[in-house]
Amino acid sequence: MPTDDLVAELEIITNNLVLGCAALAFLDLPSCHDMLDIAQMTFPGYRVPGAQIADALRDERRKTHVLGEFAKMLLRTFVRDAYQVVEEYCRNTNQLVTLSKQPWYQFARLMRNSLSHGSRLDLGDYVKRQQLPIEWVSPISGEEVTVTKEMDGCSLNTRQLSLTRAWELLQQMQQFAQAGLS
């Protein structure tokens, strides 16, 4: 795969995240309920009534849960896809060493692995290789996220990874794809 194809893949992932975030914002609007009441999602062999979603969004407790789970799904998909497309490209072009030297790499790898395996920090391999703490600095806010061995087994939280932080991480991956790879 040429580097241009990697950049294009990351752009698709970015666009998908933007669409997902737009859907989150739309679903948070009370005016969407009426539209969903009359909507039908049709799949081969069956239909899903939009009223099912509208009813969940009208109940504040259920709405918080439904939108929170949707945001988690976006986060899982987005981080896994972005990390995996970059890693696969680097593996196929013998540039894994270059990838592993990026300041965001260990953090991105840990987040991808955690999101893929129950959203828990599994730090066993990092402890064995004495690779902790893992630190990542947001390129936009300048905030630092640190993962320490005491966090082993803990659930991910929005301090460690949120849609905003994932967006910032993707920006670093895109810059790397555009300027750091051959």
Image (spheres, grey):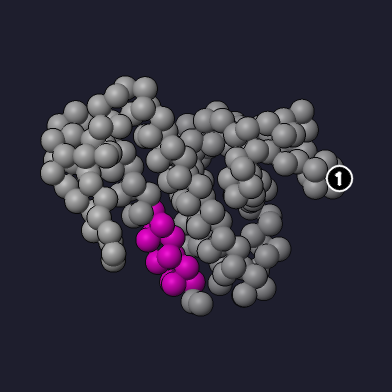
Q: Using the rendered image of the protein, determine whether residue 28 is visible from the camera's viewpoint.
A: no
Q: Residues within 10 Å of mark 1 (few under 14, many from 20)?
A: few
**Residue 55 point in image, percent of width and height:** 25, 32
Of the pair 177 and 124, the residue shown nearer to us: 124
**Residue 102 point in image, percent of width and height:** 63, 52
Secondary structure mostly seen in magenta is helix
Quick check: is 96 in the magenta stretch?
A: no
**Residue 50 point in image, percent of width and height:** 22, 44
Residue at the extreme bottom of the image, as rendered: 1
Report the side of 128 relative to 148 (left or right): right
Count of all numbered marks drawn on residues in the image: 1
Q: Which residue is mark 1?
A: 128
**Residue 23 point in image, percent of width and height:** 28, 43
Q: Amino acid at mark 1?
A: Lys
Report the side of 112 relative to 122 (left or right): left
- Quarter holding the C terminus is bottom right
Span of residues in magenta: 3-14
